Each structure stands twice: as C-alpha cells, then as structure tokens.
Image: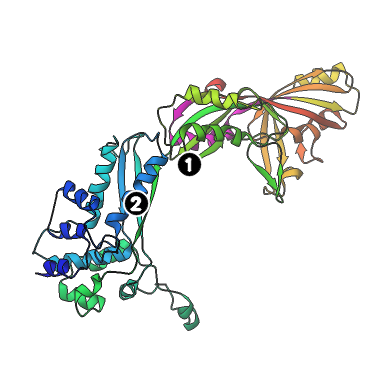
C-alpha cells in the first residue's frame, strides 16, 4: 500500500512509477521517457530527483564530442547523497510489497542501451588496455538537504580540541557510501527515528530543483618508450620559468608531448627522461631514453610509426626514434639507469696556456679515475650541498690550435662535465684546469651517447 500511495501522491515521476512496480523492461522506460504525456515531466521527482530524465542530454553530448572514441566501456555512477538517502527511504517503504528497481540499476540499463545503439560494447575484462570508463556523478544543491544533518558526525581526533576550534571546524562531509552504510538494513521505525521524521514519505516530497549529472571519460594510462635527440642550444628539456619569465624556446617535453597528445586524443601526456642536459647542450648520438605516460586516450588504433613521424615533422629541434609500448616499471627504471649508465660527451674548450704535445699525450693516458665534485655553484640554489664521487672512464684530447681543443669524455652518469673542465673554483677535483695547470673554459658541449648496461658488459 505504501508504494501505491507514493504514486497517487504525485511525489514521483512517471518513470519512477514504473520502477515502483518492478518493471524490468528497458523499452517500457524508454517509451515513457520519449512520451509527452507526463504532466510532471518538467518538475523534479521526489524519488530520483530528476536524474532519470537528466542522463540523456549529457551522455549524448559527451559522445558527440568524441566521434573517434574507441574500445569497450565500463560505467560508474555516483548518486548525490540526497539521492542515496531518498533511495534508502524508498526501499524501507517498499519492504516486501514489491521488487523495486533501484535508481542506480535503472540508470545503468538506460545508459547501456544508449551506448549499445551507438556500437559500444560493455567490457568483460576491466583491465584490458582498450577499456574506457564513463564516470557519471550526480550533483544536488536544492531543498531537502537539511535531513542530512542527522547523519553527519563531528570530526574525530586524538585530543579534545578547544572550544574555539570546535566552533570553527565543521562536521565531516557526508559521503554517499557513508549514508548507505548508516541507513541500509534499518526498519521503517528505525529509519524514522534516525532521520527525525514523523512519516517516511516526508523525506520523499518533490523538491523545488532537480539534480544534475556530470559525465567524464577516463581510461587507464599506457606507456611508450623511445629516445630523443635535441638539436638546439636554446631548448631546455622541460618548461623553464624563472620569476615568471620563460627561458628558452619551448622545451623538449612540449615538442614531444603536444603532437602525441593530439594523435591519441589524450587529456595529458607526461614526459619522463633518463637524466637531463643543460639548455645549451645538444643531445646527439643514439639519443636519450624517455618514457611517455599517455592518459585518457580517446584513439587507440594508431601506429607508433605515425606518431614518431608526426613529432619529427613538427620541427627541426627534436627528433625521436625507437618508439615502442612499455610497462609502468620502465618509467621507474629510468631514474635507476640514470645513475648507473655511462655517458659520452664532446666538448670544445679553450686553454689559457699554449697546449703542447706533452699535454695531449699525458691527458690521453689518464683514466679511469675518480672525481670528487661538490654541488656546483650554479645549482646550489636548488640542490643540497654535498660532495659526490664520479668516475671518468676515458679522456681523449684533440688539439685544434694552440689554445683550443676538443675533449671527448666517457664518464659516470650524473657527472657535471662543465665543472670538470673549468674546476668550479676548485670545487671539482681533479679537473682539466688542474691537469693543464691553467685556466680552462668550456665553449660548447654535446652529449654523444648514453651507454646501456648491456653495452657496458
């Protein structure tokens, strides 16, 4: 009798009237939603808060914005807290009178029907790479929220707060899951007492406003590995801003991630590299290893060769190669490898003293040897002061003229090559300055290669 009274009281819409009767046919609900005979269609419903009519427009708008969306889908629906509360009241009123179709289940059915009509298939294996999730979140801020105060609890703590703090600190925010846990399984009388209602139907009165539904598409991220060359001496690896002023001409990160995000229709592409080079240092040879984390990609049927060509065609400052899919653990390995690998450098240097054949012969015979490097003066503002031992495995000096020379260095990753050349006011020992017994400056520097562990063996 309670459910019949609800329908007769006009608290509910025509769609909810069907679910109160336990209707399991989606076509029947679609027919009611498509008809114009419901006099209360434009008013909010005391049972569903208008959500059963609010889902269609945002879902269709979302899908129209994603014409190339690919893959199987999962649905996630979160009702507003007031909606959860009213659903619990409804279920308590129903008791054993009928099998009421729950609001969240019906929203799932209707959305699945819409998605199926557009060719999308519901995922059976949630962890597959091509599965995307449509998150639907209900929002409600209209009348009738006062009843939630009976379910809210003060924040708990290890010590009793002062009276002033108790006045200023609001109760913990009530979540939908907390409301469900607090109300599920209660009898009619227990629920009335809990909510402070004389009659449960008071909690289902038609509100003045309807709830809304926010939709967004999410997909688990996937990872791509590759190598990059940096051919410009005015390009930092990542965006570089000092006191609000942008330094350099863009960045390696942006030159790679922007076209990748466009190709995959991704909301975000994160860039992780194995170490970094200074803005004025080129990255040559086979290139520096990097990993891309592609988030919320809309398009998956894209060949990595096409992505690589798009990045390389976008400009002449950065080139990438060897793109391939990888795992999340590859990203974690980058930092480890950055410390373990050897790197090869080529520097053009100037010497205050005239260079002799003996200087060249003695220098080329050095190695391997250890260098003690204090944190360079130029990075002290952002790195802790420490002395770091680094190994130089080989040196090769080639004289250009009496004061200029090329220097090839094979060294442990993490070594500051500029400081190894000029000595950094004696903070790097030994250095080229100490070897040549005179002032030495570095004019140009290139990274010529990052040696993989296998290569070292």
> Residue at left 79%, top 36%?
423
**Residue 441 image label:** none
For this rendering, which residue is in front, 186 or 310? 310
Displayed quadrant of residue 67: top left
Q: Which residues are magenta?
A: 324-346
**Residue 267 image label:** 1
Q: Is residue 142 magenta?
A: no
Residue 135 appears in the figure: no
Query: Is 145 rendered above or below residue 345?
Result: below
Residue 451: horizontal and vertical position, in percent?
59, 24
Quadrant (top left/top right/bottom left/bottom right) for the C terminus: top right
**Label 2 element class:** strand
Gap between marks 2 and 1, in whole Å?
A: 18 Å
**Residue 136 image label:** 2
> Residue at left 63%, top 32%?
413
Query: Is 305 rendered above or below residue 257?
Result: above
Displayed quadrant of residue 257: top right
Query: Is 393 rendered above or below residue 45?
Result: above
Residue 297 appears in the figure: yes
Left or right, 349 with respect to 46, comes to right
Residue 270: horizontal and vertical position, in percent?
52, 39
Residue 73: horizontal and vertical position, in percent?
31, 40
Q: Earlier in the sequence, mark 2 or mark 1?
A: 2
For this rendering, which residue is in front, 445 or 55? 55
Left or right, 380 with respect to 75, comes to right
């Amino acid at each position: 009798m309670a459910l019949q009274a609800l329908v007769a009281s006009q608290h509910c819409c025509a769609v909810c009237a069907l679910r109160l009767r336990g209707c399991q046919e989606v076509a029947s609900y679609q027919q009611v939603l498509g008809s114009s005979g419901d006099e209360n269609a434009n008013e909010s419903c005391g049972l569903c808060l208008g959500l059963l009519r609010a889902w269609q427009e945002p879902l269709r708008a979302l899908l129209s914005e994603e014409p190339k969306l690919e893959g199987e889908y999962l649905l996630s629906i979160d009702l507003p807290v007031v909606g959860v509360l009213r659903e619990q009241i409804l279920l308590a009123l129903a008791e054993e009178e009928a099998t009421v179709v729950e609001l969240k289940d019906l929203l799932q059915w209707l959305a699945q029907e819409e998605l199926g009509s557009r060719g999308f298939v519901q995922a059976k294996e949630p962890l597959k790479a091509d599965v995307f999730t449509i998150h639907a979140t209900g929002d409600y801020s209209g009348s009738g929220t006062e009843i939630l105060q009976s379910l809210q609890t003060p924040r708990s703590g290890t010590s009793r707060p002062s009276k002033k703090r108790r006045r200023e600190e609001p109760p913990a925010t009530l979540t939908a899951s907390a409301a469900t846990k607090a109300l599920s399984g209660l009898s009619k009388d227990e629920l009335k007492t809990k909510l402070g209602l004389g009659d449960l139907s008071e909690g289902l009165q038609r509100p003045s406003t309807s709830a809304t539904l926010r939709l967004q598409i999410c997909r688990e991220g996937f990872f791509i590995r590759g190598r990059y060359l940096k051919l410009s001496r005015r390009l930092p690896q990542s965006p570089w801003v000092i006191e609000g002023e942008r330094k350099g001409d863009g960045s390696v990160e942006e030159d790679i991630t922007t076209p990748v995000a466009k190709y995959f229709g991704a909301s975000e592409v994160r860039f992780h590299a194995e170490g970094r080079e200074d803005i004025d240092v080129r990255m040559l040879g086979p290139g520096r290893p990097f990993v891309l984390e592609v988030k919320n990609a809309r398009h998956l049927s894209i060949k990595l060769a096409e992505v690589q060509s798009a990045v390389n065609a976008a400009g002449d400052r950065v080139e990438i190669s060897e793109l391939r899919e990888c795992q999340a653990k590859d990203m974690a390995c980058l930092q480890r490898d950055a410390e373990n690998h050897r790197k090869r450098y080529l520097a053009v240097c100037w010497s205050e003293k005239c260079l002799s054949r003996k200087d060249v012969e003695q220098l080329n015979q050095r190695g391997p040897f250890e260098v003690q490097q204090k944190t360079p003066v130029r990075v002290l503002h952002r790195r802790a002061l420490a002395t770091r031992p680094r190994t130089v495995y080989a040196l090769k000096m080639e004289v250009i003229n009496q004061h200029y020379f090329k220097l090839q260095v094979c060294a442990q990753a993490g070594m500051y090559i500029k400081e190894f050349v000029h000595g950094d006011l004696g903070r790097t020992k030994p250095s080229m300055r100490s070897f040549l017994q005179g002032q030495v400056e570095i004019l140009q520097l290139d990274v010529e290669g990052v040696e993989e562990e296998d290569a070292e063996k």
